[in-house]
Image (spheres, grey):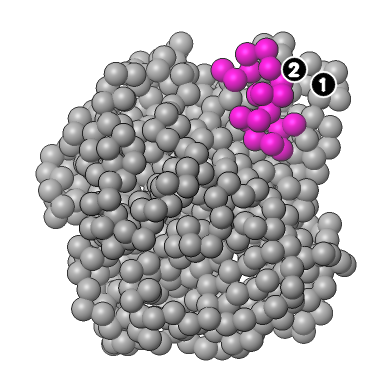
Amino acid sequence: MPHGYIGKILRVDLSSGRVTTEEFPENFYRQYLGGEGFTGYFLLKEVPPRVDPLGPDNKLIFAAGPLTGVPVGGCGRHSVGAKSPLTGAFGEAEAGGYWGAELKMAGFDAVIVEGKAEKPVYIFIRDGGAEIRDAAHLWGMRTLECQNTIREELGDPLIKVAQIGPAGEKLVRFACVINDLDAAAGRTGMGAVMGSKKLKAVACRGRQRVSLADPEQVKEIGTWVRDNTPIILKGMHDFGTSRLVPALNSAGGLPTRNFQLGSIDGAEQISGQTMKDTILTRRRACFACAVQCKREVKVDEPYLVDPRYGGPEYETLAALGSDCGITDLKALAKANELANAYGLDTISCGAAIAFAMECFENGLVTAKDTGGVELRFGNAQAMLQMVEEIALRRGFGDVLAEGVARAAQQIGSGAEAFALHIKGQELPMHEPRWKQGMGVGYAISPTGADHCHNIHDIAYTEMTPMLEVMKAVGILEPMPLDDLSAGKVRLLKYYSEFIHLLNCTVCCYFVMSLGLMGFDRLTQLVRAVTGWDTTFFELLKVGERVVNLARVFNLREGFGAEDDSMPSRFFSPHPSGPLKVALDPEAFQKAKEAYYDMMGWPGGVPSPGKLGELGIEWALPLLAQK
């Protein structure tokens, strides 16, 4: 077994109560690495076609990677995957914090959860063993109460808990899995899958350190990361991701009023600077990281906000803030606390509320439908009430808990025009009329619209450190934001595959970003950890392999090129504001087709030659199961 891995995968069958440990050959680890790679492999190998995502035949996979738990900044992440109840497609999300490292220390590289328990349970993993424990007393608890109770009954305050809140129990389709109270495997509804299995939490505690092939080289790289990241990522340290708000607003790239606009008056009131000057109490870090980009906030009036739930990041501030027409920072801090307490993806939650507000203002939804709630843009109290109603599936919140695609079908009367989603997943808070390459990335993403395994065009409009590193793969010149040429598509292909690689290793996008680590240093780290004589070419092929596995999975589940779409709203410009352009439908279609060509996907379907080149020809017969 290579260094960097424990060499054991835990399988828990909740239907039978059977807990087993499995071992896989070294080539399995080298081919799929971990994280998203494990999810792609096990979903295709073990989940039958067309299963109900909320049924017992779906499988939930918690997976670390070779870098998880390595004492280097950015190496504290893990992945959670399953067939998504929000989209019906490939589902997967990453989270930071400390839980992933603790899983490795507790003796496992991954946990495969299958079946369904008859009553609520949680899994306790400790020092190479695991048991299923009763969780009836935990069911219904918010995340803080649940974490405290588990730690108290197990007698260890250092236990790390990945869990669902009431939203996951209620099967809200965009419920997430929360660990450390402020880290979320947020997108694609993994919390609902967990809730459908009556699994409240997975608690970990271990003392096993990750084995390293070359400890001195790892220490050297770790020291470099420690000494350089707080300087290079100073903006992240000082303001977190909320530092983005003013720049996006001035460019017209801040989603506002359900993406009708790209800027909002008062945006500075929800900026990272304002947060720092008013409600920030301290900064938090993930495992072994010196950047400390996570926020902790405290509010005493007019809302009580518990700092133990952390603080809002950019996506939360935009989704529940500007996209809902709201610039009340204290209200957004409260919304963030509620989302972390109930276990909700703040992106989809905010997008669902913004969708409902546009429906309300156009008369498709009335106060009679909402139980008297005036769902108008700018109404912070209505937003906060709706967060709770969604989490508890109460009143009109029960409609929105299904996600905007299903909610629009239920509302009817043309509500589909306001439901901004791709493959059923709500758009993140990045404007595709501004970052147009990202718009193509939204469309082709296997998980529905996603900003993480994607490019951010603004990083490549001039000779930035990101672009300097990309020269190593032939991206040599800056490109405009609205460029959808073959060059931009090539950039999308290479960079998104790099991010999918990071989802397999599993490590932080910010710390391991190209402008900081570069291809060479990341490759050196993987070599120093595992002992493999690997190259960046081999590693990038892991990212490409995972994209193809996810594509095969989606094709098998009935998705095709026609689902790689974009809501029509984004083909028209904002009616006012600094951004004057929109996506061009012809250029968008040509860019999507160019991506298929570059991927070896004629008509959007991976060719036998492509699957063979990636060593996953075993997946070819699965395409016939469509």
Q: Who's the residue at 36% across and 61% down the image?
A: 618
Secondary structure beneath dot 2 equals loop
Secondary structure beneath dot 1 equals loop
Against 263, residue 40 (above or below) is below
Q: Position of residue 482 (x, y in %)?
A: 27, 26
> Residue 365 bears which disc, if any?
2
Can residue 273 be seen at all in this image of the molecule?
A: no
Q: Which residues are magenta?
A: 399-417
| Quadrant where the N terminus is found in the figure | bottom left
In the image, what residue type sits under mark 2? Val
Left or right of 264? Residue 478 is: left
Magenta highlight on residue 400: yes
Can residue 109 be seen at all in this image of the molecule?
A: yes
Q: Position of residue 454 (x, y in %)?
A: 37, 44
Q: Are marks 2 and 1 in contact (CB under 8 Å)?
A: yes
Residue for badge 1: 369
Against 369, residue 461 (above or below) is below
Q: Position of residue 235 (x, y in %)?
A: 40, 51
